[in-house]
Image (spheres, rainbow, N blue to C red):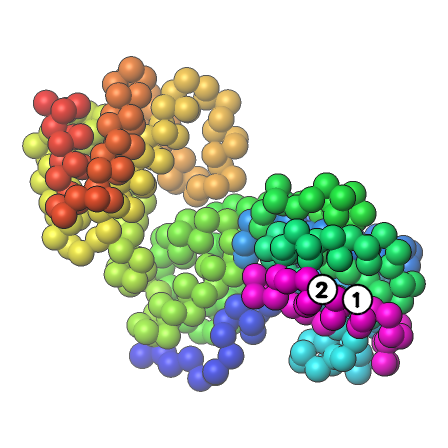
């Protein structure tokens, strides 16, 4: 059995250290690298998008790049004392706070005082505020005052997963960069590289299952990989199912096929196997609903194939296409509505499998 002989978490060990290392955010990294190369540094940046997509990582890379002693083509060298200090969280001139736990006006006033003083060592004092949407209205007002008249030596980098909660006055005073969810293929590819580097044996389907569970966030995927490989020494589909309570794509596809064929007897039997096997029937309901949604969408608009190909593997897309050929749209609409309703009932039912079974019986009998 393989034992990973390190104490540092995988997501930290494989955190990108340059903009070029960031995956899936080319529209962000390209613009930033070009601006940094030309020494066009804004006084405030706003990074927004889903969790685990690289916002805080890029904030730290920018902090390194603008203070690097040997910056080249907009990238930090990662070997000078300034880069190493930031990389090891030892830089006095880079202050990072989590607004979720430091959301009041007093914390922002402290930041205001810090911005007034010149950097101790670096060229710029960098203030990174994560989950900035959590600040109180009073704290936002205090922050706004600083952003309106920022000191020349201070750079603010704000990060948030909930852009819509930010005041327009704050947004208008920043350079804004939107982060997208990563595709399943992008995440699975990175997981594969990590497994190969760490000499962890894996099944490709298992990595795809982890990537799917991460919902577009590479950090969550890396944490799951770390957990599973630490417990089991390898990463198989069975291991992932056991940890997540989630079934793999083949089981979801098989069950969806039984529903499309209106095979009630086998559908009920298979659902019972999933339930007694210890899998999460809530998640199974969601997976089936999502699968049938894709089948219905592809049936009604084949052009969606290109869009779906970004989120699922080629082999999986082929199965969905095959089911779309057989599907009856009117029937699928009824089933999807029933499954959504069943999911609501399942949450408050002492026998959560029962609403799922009834949804199948009502539509397949």
The vertical placement of 363 against 23, above or below, is above
Dot 1 surroundings within 10 Å: few (below 14), some, or many (20 or more)? some
Q: Is residue 333 above or below residue 42?
A: above
Q: What residue lies at 12% left-to-right and 39% top-to-bottom?
A: 354
Vertical placement of residue 284 versus 83, above or below:
above
Residue interval drawn in magenta? 95-123
Q: Secondary structure at mark 1?
A: helix
Q: Mark 2: which secondary structure?
A: helix
What quarter of the picture does the N terminus occupy? bottom left
Q: Nearer the viewer, residue 113 or 89?
A: 113
Q: Which x, y percent locates residue 341?
A: 26, 31
Where residue 61 appears, x then y in whole percent? 72, 65
Q: Position of residue 298 (x, y in %)?
A: 41, 24
Q: Quadrant of residue 121?
A: bottom right
Q: Which residue is mark 2?
A: 108
Q: Is residue 321 magenta?
A: no
Rendered residue at 62%/52% (across/down): 133
Q: Pick whichever, 279 or 5, lies toward us.
A: 279
Residue 17 visible in the shown view: no
Q: Residues within 10 Å of mark 2 (few under 14, many from 20)?
A: many
Answer above or below: position of 124 versus 336.
below
Is residue 272 among what the camera can see? yes
Between 83 and 295, which is closer to the camera in this rendering? 83
Q: Which residue is mark 1?
A: 112
Q: Residue at point 42% right, 65% down? A: 225
Image coordinates for residue 201, horizontal then vertical, percent: 38, 68
Q: Is residue 56 left or right of residue 84?
A: left
- Which quadrant of the rendered structure holds the C terminus? top left
Is 301 situated left or right of 288 in this image?
Answer: right
Residue at 24% from the left image edge and 44% from the top image edge? 347
Do labels 1 and 2 touch, CB within 8 Å?
Answer: yes
**Residue 106 falls inside the magenta stretch:** yes
């Amino acid at each position: 059995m393989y034992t990973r002989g390190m104490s540092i978490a995988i997501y930290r060990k494989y955190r990108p250290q340059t903009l070029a290392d960031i995956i899936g955010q080319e529209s962000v990294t390209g613009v930033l690298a070009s601006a940094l190369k030309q020494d066009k540094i804004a006084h405030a940046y706003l990074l927004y998008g889903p969790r685990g997509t690289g916002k805080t990582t890029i904030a730290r890379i920018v902090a390194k790049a603008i203070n690097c002693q040997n910056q080249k083509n907009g990238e930090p060298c990662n070997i000078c004392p300034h880069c190493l200090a930031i990389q090891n969280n030892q830089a006095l001139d880079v202050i990072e706070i989590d607004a979720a736990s430091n959301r009041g006006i007093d914390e922002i006033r402290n930041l205001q005082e810090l911005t007034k003083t010149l950097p101790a060592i670096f060229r710029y004092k960098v203030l990174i505020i994560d989950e900035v949407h959590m600040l109180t209205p009073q704290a936002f007002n205090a922050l706004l005052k600083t952003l309106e008249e920022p000191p020349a030596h201070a750079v603010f980098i704000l990060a948030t997963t909930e852009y819509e909660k930010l005041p327009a006055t704050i947004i208008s005073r920043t350079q804004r960069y939107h982060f997208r969810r990563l595709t399943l293929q992008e995440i699975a590819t990175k997981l594969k590289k990590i497994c190969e580097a760490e000499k962890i044996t894996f099944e490709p389907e298992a990595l795809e299952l982890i990537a799917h569970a991460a919902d577009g966030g590479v950090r969550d995927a890396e944490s799951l990989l770390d957990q599973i490989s630490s417990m089991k020494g390898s990463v198989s589909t069975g291991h992932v199912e056991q940890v997540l309570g989630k079934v793999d794509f083949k089981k979801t596809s098989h069950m969806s096929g039984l529903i499309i064929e209106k095979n009630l007897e086998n559908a009920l039997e298979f659902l019972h196997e999933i339930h007694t096997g210890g899998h999460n029937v809530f998640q199974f309901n969601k997976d089936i609903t999502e699968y049938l949604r894709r089948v219905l969408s592809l049936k009604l608009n084949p052009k969606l194939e290109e869009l779906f190909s970004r989120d699922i593997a080629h082999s999986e897309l082929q199965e969905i296409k095959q089911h779309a050929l057989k599907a009856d749209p009117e029937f699928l609409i009824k089933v999807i509505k029933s499954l959504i309703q069943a999911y609501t009932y399942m949450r408050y039912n002492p026998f959560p499998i029962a609403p799922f079974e009834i949804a199948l019986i009502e539509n397949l009998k």
